[in-house]
Every structure is written in structure tokens, then in C-alpha cells.
């Protein structure tokens, strides 16, 4: 039970970073940093669109990553619950 609560706390805990949260992720970090710098140096519709596209790709990546982590945790929990639940039930026939 304690393991399940620890996993739940880890899943729902917010991420802590420094500065702009979208710049802390490593997925496409260089491209996103260049788009952010270009948008801050020369704000225009083109640089804004590039920055928005990088943020859209980051959101899609983090959403897919979060769902895959959740699925993996649920599958592992289901497997562990099954094995612990059926641990003492096995009978041998003689």
C-alpha cells in the first residue's frame, strides 16, 4: 500500500525547475532555445509561430511520455497485485 501511495505522489507531484518551464525539458532543447531566443530578439509573427510550434511539439511529447509512464506503472502494479494476491492460493496435488 505504501508503494502505491509513493507512486501516486510521484505521478501527481509538480515538476520544479528554474526559469521558463518549457526551457527545462531536454526534448528538442536546442531547437526550442533557438526559437525562444529568436522570438525574444526579434518579435514577429514568424518567430512567434516558430516558438508556438516548438511549444506544441513539447506538449505533445510530454503528453505521450506521461501516458506511457502511467500505463507502465499501472501494468507493473497490476502484475505485482496479481502475484501477491495469488501467492498463498496455489495448491499442489499429490
Image (cartoon, rainbow, N blue to C red):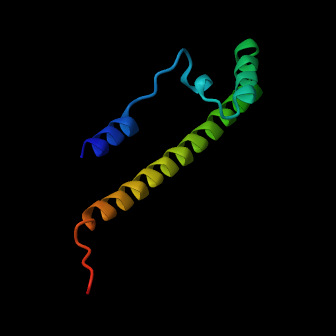
Q: Quadrant of residue 59?
A: top right
Residue 8 placement (x, y as % from top left): 33, 41
Residue 17 placement (x, y as % from top left): 51, 20
Residue 30 placement (x, y as % from top left): 74, 26
Please name the residue shown 42% across and 50% down the image.
73
Q: Nearer the viewer, residue 45 or 29?
A: 29
Q: Residue furthest bottom?
A: 94
Horizontal arrangement in the rendering, residue 15 relative to residue 82 (left or right): right
Please name the residue shown 28% across and 60% down the image.
84
Horizontal arrangement in the rendering, residue 68 relative to residue 56 (left or right): left
Q: Nearer the viewer, residue 74 or 33?
A: 74
Please name the residue shown 33% across and 36% down the image.
9
Please name the residue shown 42% across and 58% down the image.
75
Q: Is residue 48 above or below residue 88?
A: above
Q: Is residue 3 above or below residue 17?
A: below
Q: Quadrant of residue 91?
A: bottom left
Q: Residue furthest top?
A: 41
Q: Residue furthest front?
A: 94
Amino acid at each position: 500500500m505504501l508503494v502505491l501511495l509513493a507512486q501516486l505522489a510521484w505521478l501527481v507531484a509538480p515538476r520544479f525547475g528554474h526559469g521558463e518551464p518549457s526551457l527545462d525539458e531536454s526534448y528538442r532543447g536546442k531547437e526550442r532555445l533557438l526559437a525562444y531566443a529568436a522570438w525574444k530578439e526579434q518579435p514577429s509573427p514568424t518567430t512567434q509561430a516558430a516558438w508556438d510550434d516548438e511549444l506544441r511539439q513539447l506538449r505533445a511529447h510530454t503528453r505521450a511520455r506521461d501516458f506511457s509512464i502511467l500505463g507502465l506503472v499501472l501494468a507493473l502494479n497490476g502484475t505485482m497485485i496479481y502475484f501477491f494476491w495469488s501467492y498463498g492460493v496455489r495448491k499442489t496435488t499429490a
